[in-house]
Image (spheres, rainbow, N blue to C red):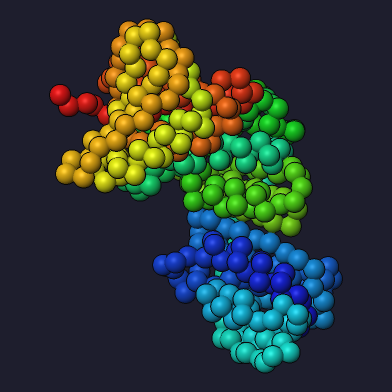
Amino acid sequence: MKLVCSQLELNSALQLVSRAVATRPTHPVLANVLMTADAGTNRLSLTGFDLNLGIQTSFTASVEISGAITLPAKLFVEIVSRLSSDSPISLFTDEIGDQLELKSLSGSYQMRGMSADEFPELPLVENGFALKVNASSLLKGLRGTLFSSSSDEAKQLLTGVHLTFNGHLMEAAATDGHRLAILSLEEALISESINAEPEQQLAVTLPSRSLREVERLISSWKEDDPISIFYDSGQVVFLADDQVLTSRTLEGNYPNYRQLLPDQFLHNIEIDRRLFISALERIAVLADQHNNVVKISLTSNDDLMKITTDAQDVGSGSESIPAIYQGDSFEIAFNVRYVLEGLKVIDSSKVNLACNAPTTPAVISPIDDENGFTYLVMPVQIRA
């Protein structure tokens, strides 16, 4: 291998693919990134793959001799990131292909690598589903649900986001057992080519870790180019421009989350979203000192909603904000962090807080918003 490339492009590519490098590799080569140079296309490709998540990207380089090598990701990133962006980088490998020499204007470095033959191939999807999705729609779906997935690995399926593609509709859902976020988007699919039964929808649950990388990739793009999604045999591939991301699916039947939503509500409270967030953030300073619980109270024929917290041995706090409410006096308590996280992904200026009883699920939804977002939160039992 012999080539010259830009430090900026090499550093950017390394930062990207190293996110898929195993932190505790089961095999030494999984701690490396695969670098492949092609003289025919003058492209340099980099790949990180931990057997669950894979990221590959490529960029233009001046390639004199084709070749491939794997290099320790952490060391490679540390060296390249500290080189001057004003100087091009020259890369050479020896005849055996297990040692790389890197040269720039400031100096030269040698790194011992491993043969590219030892690096596992990224999974390819040849059959099954092939979809083309609006990048902005997918980004909205992920931002509106990822925060609600579980971080408890023992909960397996709940550590991911459930994605459903049906016709031109995309629905994303995530729950950790305490709250549930659902976002339905019309016209999310540009096209679909399904090598399966007619009218069959695609429904997969993907690890949140993989989808956070998809979110990060889309956020960095300057244009809203479509994303191709391929699915087959427990593997999903996201393909766009010069970047490829592969992920294993989470196996099992995702919970029927729609049945958790109440059919009707006794109490409906309309609130200004920004005022609600500001009040909760102020009172959370005290709530965080104890158990994160805030109490919401409404009095019959009153146009104010009262938010209180009592942090034992620390202090207490109270906020009141305008609200549109018609009904009997009512009181319910929540984990303030759960409520805040849901409110912050809503675009609408006003939200509706709907509930039945202090011990049954409450639902927060946007008012006059074109996206179908529903956020269910389990209340905290108020002790007398």
Residue sitting nearer the eye, 43 or 331: 331
Tell me if I can see residue 164 in this picture.
no
In the picture, measured across the screen, residue 173 lies left or right of residue 3, that is: left
Q: Split into 4 quadrants, where in the image is the N terminus?
A: bottom right
Nearer to me, 264 or 234: 264
Find the residue positioned furthest to the bottom: 107
Q: Which residue is drawn at the image coordinates 54% and 49% (left, top)?
A: 212
Instruction: Judge whether 113 appears above or below 285 on screen.
Output: below
**Hey, which quadrant is residue 90 in on the image?**
bottom right
Q: Is residue 215 visible?
A: yes
The answer to whether residue 113 is above or below residue 106 is: above
Q: Is residue 368 left or right of residue 252?
A: right
| Count of marks overlaid on the render | 0
Which residue, as the protein is rendered here, is positioned at the far right? 40
Position of 103 compared to 212: left or right? right
The residue at 61%/37% (across/down) is: 140
Left/right placement of residue 384 relative to residue 117 reads left
